[in-house]
């Protein structure tokens, strides 16, 4: 397992985790969610035009605000993580927050499991607190539960419900500037697995997600996901899998085609970062997709 040497970082007494929030043009959501986090917060503002930076600085001076000149997407979380000085990072969106006591619970679980790089929490959606369907899928992961992990093993995660070990996150480069958002999690998850780290779903830790009304139209979001799938495939998957990803996108109709077109400007950047996965990680991917390893 690749591990970076520990650095001598100063941090607030008693604080082991920093919440990193990336946001763009959701001032009102932020003003409501920021006070709910039971840890220091770094807010990365992705070039908002709605007065987010000034409003947060006035209402929540305790929050570290990192204003960006352009929209960096998920890469903004990596920039925000560099402002944190804690051994663990918890990610949240502007419309989500960690349940009371659960950041401390997550840190205790991660300290008890040294190979665990990323913990994906249970996600409760909306005022009705319904379980996000992805959690049921994670709980039934065909990768099983290794003895040194606290829950079912994963090769993917939901960014706004993840607590990560800072040294592992930094060692694999965090969220990259190529994929951006949405669908930014896959490349990071794969690289953590390649480095020998574990990812697990832990039902005992909870995050609340009340989706903001200020969201992309479903078609636009699906196009973004297809863009991310293609770029991630170019960076990490064998040529045959890249071709299948392109074919799947074309069969998906307009969102897939739009996603392919949106990926074109970043193809060269993805190819420069290409490092195909080793066989053991590809086998786990096939198992997750229901294929014979």
Image (spheres, rainbow, N blue to C red):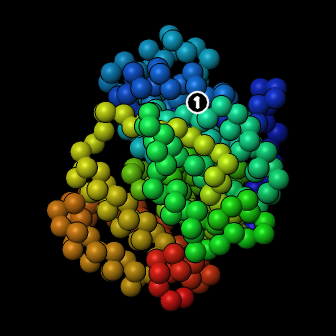
Q: Quadrant of the N terminus?
A: bottom right
Res. 145 visible in picture: yes
Above or below 145: residue 91? above
Q: Is residue 203 left or right of residue 156?
A: right
Q: Nearer the viewer, residue 272 or 154?
A: 154
Residue drawn 50% across the image and 10% down it: 58
Residue drawn 54% across the image and 24% down it: 34
- The kind of secondary structure element at disc 1 is strand
Q: Residues within 10 Å of mark 1 (few under 14, many from 20)?
A: many
Above or below 130: residue 57? above
Q: Is residue 227 left or right of residue 82?
A: left
Q: Quadrant of residue 211?
A: top left
Res. 17 visible in picture: no
Residue drawn 81% across the image and 29% down it: 14
Picture coordinates of residue 243, whole percent (x, y): 33, 80
Above or below 212: residue 280? below
Residue drawn 37% across the image and 77% down it: 242
Q: Which residue sits furthest bottom? A: 292
Q: Quadrant of the C terminus?
A: bottom right
Picture coordinates of residue 261, whole percent (x, y): 22, 61
Picture coordinates of residue 280, whole percent (x, y): 62, 81
Give the residue pinned by disc 1.
42
Q: Is residue 83 left or right of residue 51?
A: right
Picture coordinates of residue 244, whole percent (x, y): 33, 80
Q: Quadrant of residue 42?
A: top right
Q: Nearer the viewer, residue 120 or 257?
A: 120
């Amino acid at each position: 397992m690749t591990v970076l040497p520990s650095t001598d970082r100063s941090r607030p007494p008693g604080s082991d985790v920093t919440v990193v929030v990336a946001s763009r043009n959701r001032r009102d959501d932020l003003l409501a969610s920021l006070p709910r986090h039971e840890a220091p917060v770094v807010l990365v503002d992705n070039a908002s035009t709605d007065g987010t930076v000034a409003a947060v600085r006035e209402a929540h001076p305790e929050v570290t605000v990192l204003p960006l000149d352009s929209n960096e997407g998920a890469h903004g979380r990596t920039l925000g993580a560099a402002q944190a000085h804690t051994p663990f990072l918890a990610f949240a969106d502007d419309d989500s927050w960690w349940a009371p006591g659960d950041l401390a619970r997550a840190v205790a679980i991660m300290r008890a499991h040294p190979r665990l790089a990323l913990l994906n929490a249970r996600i409760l959606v909306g005022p009705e607190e319904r379980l996000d369907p992805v959690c049921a899928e994670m709980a039934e992961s065909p990768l099983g539960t290794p003895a040194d992990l606290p829950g079912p093993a994963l090769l993917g995660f939901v960014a706004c419900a993840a607590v990560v070990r800072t040294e592992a996150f930094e060692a694999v480069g965090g969220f990259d500037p190529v994929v951006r958002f949405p669908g930014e999690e896959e490349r990071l998850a794969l690289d953590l697995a390649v480095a020998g780290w574990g990812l697990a779903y832990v039902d005992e830790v909870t995050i609340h997600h009340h989706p903001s009304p200020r969201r992309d139209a479903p078609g636009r979001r699906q196009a973004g996901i297809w863009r991310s799938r293609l770029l991630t495939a170019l960076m990490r998957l064998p040529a045959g899998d890249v071709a299948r990803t392109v074919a799947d996108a074309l069969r998906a109709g307009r969102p897939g085609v739009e996603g392919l077109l949106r990926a074109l400007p970043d193809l060269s950047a993805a190819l420069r970062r290409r490092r195909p996965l080793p066989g053991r990680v590809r086998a786990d991917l096939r198992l997750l997709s229901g294929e014979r390893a």
